[in-house]
Image (cartoon, rainbow, N blue to C red):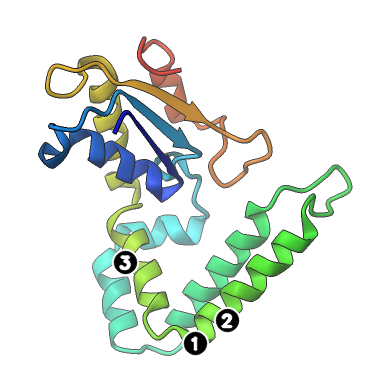
């Protein structure tokens, strides 16, 4: 494996893959992180949930009315803002947006574990504190490589991405690192 590319949460997976002792025998020399979730700008409700992940999980596990709906609603709203819009506010790819919206509705209606899966990923992999850890690991890879190997890392952002914007203040700390472009 010479190149490993991860998009969104896959950016975290690529950081973990680069550091995994199981992969030391396979040389990862290039990482590509496309709009990695470790730089996501979460809405206030998600930031509050980050502070009490155990309570949110307990509420979901116990079927407290409205909690699953709130999570699904937030996920659907995120879908609405994730698709790029033109200056007039219309979606640049309306067919793709509509297809994603229908897919998500179908998923929530028919997949019995999807709400818990989304909650689990958000409450355990994407909290503010945990994303700080991922950013630290990425910086360590850039500064020190892995297992004696330098790993060239490329961060790629769309200029219309408002979920994981290129303007994240966390990105300023990476500008001085020579192995990150």
Give coordinates of residue 154: x percent, y percent: 44, 24
Q: Which mark is residue 38?
A: none
**C-alpha distance separating marks 2 and 1:** 6 Å
Q: Is residue 75 above or below residue 25?
A: below
Q: Residue at x 41, y 76 (%)?
A: 114
Whether the residues at callouts 2 and 1 have beta carbons within 8 Å, the answer is yes
Residue neighbourhood size for the residue with mark 2, other residues' Cα within 10 Å, grouped as few (<14), some (14–19), many (≥20):
few
Q: Residue furthest right?
A: 88
**Residue 101 visible:** yes
- 82 versus 54 height, above or below: above
**Quarter assignment of residue 48:** bottom left
Name the residue at 32% across, 28% down: 2
Label 3, secondary structure: give it: helix
User: Does dot 1 land on a helix, a strand or a loop?
Assistant: helix
Which sits earlier in the primary sequence, circle 3 or circle 1? 1
Q: Are marks 3 and 1 in contact (CB under 8 Å)?
A: no
Q: CA distance from mark 3 to mark 1?
A: 18 Å
**Where is mark 3, residue-wise?**
120
The numbered dot on residue 106 is 2
Q: Which residue is mark 1?
A: 110
Q: Position of residue 36 (x, y in %)?
A: 44, 40
Q: Residue drawn at (30%, 23%), measured in percent from left and top?
A: 29
Q: In this rendered view, identify the residue nearer to me: 167 or 94.
A: 94
3 or 2: tag closer to the N-terminus: 2
Q: Tell me where residue 58 appears, x and y as whole percent.
A: 26, 79
């Amino acid at each position: 494996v010479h190149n490993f590319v991860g998009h969104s949460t896959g950016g975290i997976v690529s950081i973990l893959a680069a550091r995994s002792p199981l992969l030391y025998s396979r040389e990862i020399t290039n990482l590509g992180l496309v709009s990695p979730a470790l730089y996501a700008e979460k809405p206030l409700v998600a930031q509050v949930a980050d502070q009490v992940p155990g309570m949110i999980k307990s509420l979901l596990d116990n079927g407290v009315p409205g909690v699953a709906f709130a999570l699904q609603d937030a996920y659907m709203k995120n879908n609405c803002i994730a698709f790029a819009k033109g200056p007039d506010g219309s979606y640049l790819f309306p067919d793709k947006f509509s297809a994603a919206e229908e897919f998500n509705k179908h998923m929530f209606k028919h997949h019995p574990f999807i709400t818990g899966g989304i909650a689990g990923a958000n409450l355990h992999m994407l909290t503010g504190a945990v994303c700080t850890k991922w950013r630290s690991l990425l910086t360590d890879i850039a500064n020190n490589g892995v297992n004696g190997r330098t790993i060239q890392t490329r961060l790629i952002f769309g200029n219309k991405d408002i979920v994981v914007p290129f303007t994240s203040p966390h990105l300023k700390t990476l500008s001085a690192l020579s192995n990150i472009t």
